[in-house]
Amino acid sequence: MPSAFVLINTEIGAEAEVLKALKNVEGIAEAYAVYGVYDIIAKVTAESMDKLKEIVTWHVRRLDKVRSTLTMIVVEESS
């Protein structure tokens, strides 16, 4: 099952609002507000790579108050 981590920058002060909105996006397995260069990190899982790309492009990146994202597709998971 393809998965990716998406690092998200939000508009200033919108972290909680974006985090709440992410919880309603299909395919978001986990999401956390973090300190550092990015404001939120989210784990996305999907049944195919095409579906994964769709979730990130059309659902995560288009959320209101998301300024930018960096997507890291998982190549290998530890067991």
Image: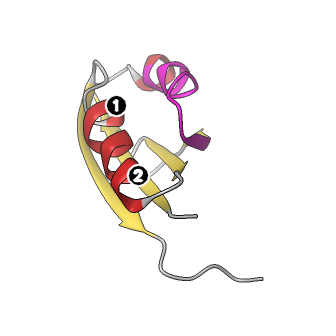
Q: Quadrant of residue 10?
A: top left
In the image shown, does 11 or 62 lie closer to the viewer? 62
x and y percentages locating residue 44 in the rendered image? 51, 49
Identity of the amino acid at label 2? Leu
Q: Earlier in the sequence, mark 2 or mark 1?
A: 2
Real-space Cα separation, disc 2 to disc 1, in angstroms: 10 Å
At 38% across and 20% down in the image, what residue appears? 14
Label at residue 52 = 2
Is residue 73 shown above or below 63?
A: below
In the image shown, does 41 or 58 lie closer to the viewer? 58
Q: Quadrant of residue 78?
A: bottom right
Q: Is residue 77 visible?
A: yes
In the image shown, does 6 or 27 lie closer to the viewer? 27
x and y percentages locating residue 42 in the rendered image? 51, 46
What's the magenta region? 18-30
Name the quadrant of the C terminus: bottom right
Which residue is the extreme one toward the right? 79
Neighbor class of circle 2 (other Cα within 10 Å; few <14, some 14-19, many 20+) is: many
Secondary structure type for disc 2 = helix
Disc 1 target residue: 59
